[in-house]
Amino acid sequence: MGERVVQVGSALSVFIAVALVVFGAYRVRYGAGTTDEAVVLLFLAVGVVASYRSLAVHAGPRVNGIGNTALFAGAVAAYAGGTHFGIGPAVTVGQALFAIAVAYFLLRGY
């Protein structure tokens, strides 16, 4: 039963991620959004999938999964805030946090 729940959760997180990316592409295609907003939604999509996998699939202490999720959340928040308010250093911090979160996620998986 537990394995089936994890599979359903994984499928749901991928569905949400794809919906976010498609929404961002739709907004750019029809002029309602910018490419920076689409990148924010892409970061959010990666964060959703990686955070779910970090919490539900990867072995190890739960605190590591929570820390990885917090890194993704901070990265998306900093990047989105920097993009929305035009604060260059916040965008840079968001990109750096995102790179750290992805590296940590990949290292945790092995």
Image (cartoon, helix red, strand yellow):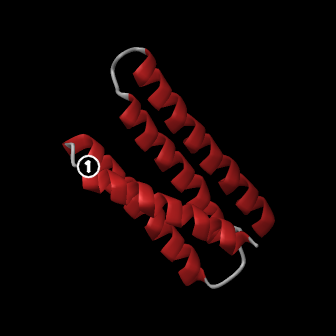
Say left or right for 94 vs 84. right
**Residue found at x 75% / y 56%:** 7
Q: Position of residue 44 (x, y in %)?
A: 47, 49
For the question of whether residue 12 can be seen, the reply is yes
13 vs 39: above or below: below
**Residue found at x 51% / y 75%:** 66
Quarter occupied by residue 51: bottom right
Crowd class of label 1 (few under 14; some 14 to 19; many from 20; radius 10 Å): few
- Which residue lies most toward the top here? 30
Q: In what quadrant of the picture does the C terminus appear? A: bottom right
Q: Position of residue 100 (x, y in %)?
A: 51, 66
**Residue found at x 45% / y 17%:** 29
Query: Given the image, on which type of amino acid does mark 1 rest?
Result: Gly
66 vs 61: above or below: above
Say left or right for 67 vs 35. right
Q: In what quadrant of the picture does the N terminus appear? A: bottom right
- Near-viewer residue (100 or 32): 100
Say left or right for 45 vs 95. right
13 vs 22: above or below: below
61 vs 20: above or below: below
**Residue found at x 35% / y 16%:** 31
Q: Position of residue 2 (x, y in %)?
A: 76, 68
Q: Which residue is mark 1?
A: 88
Q: Position of residue 42 (x, y in %)?
A: 50, 42
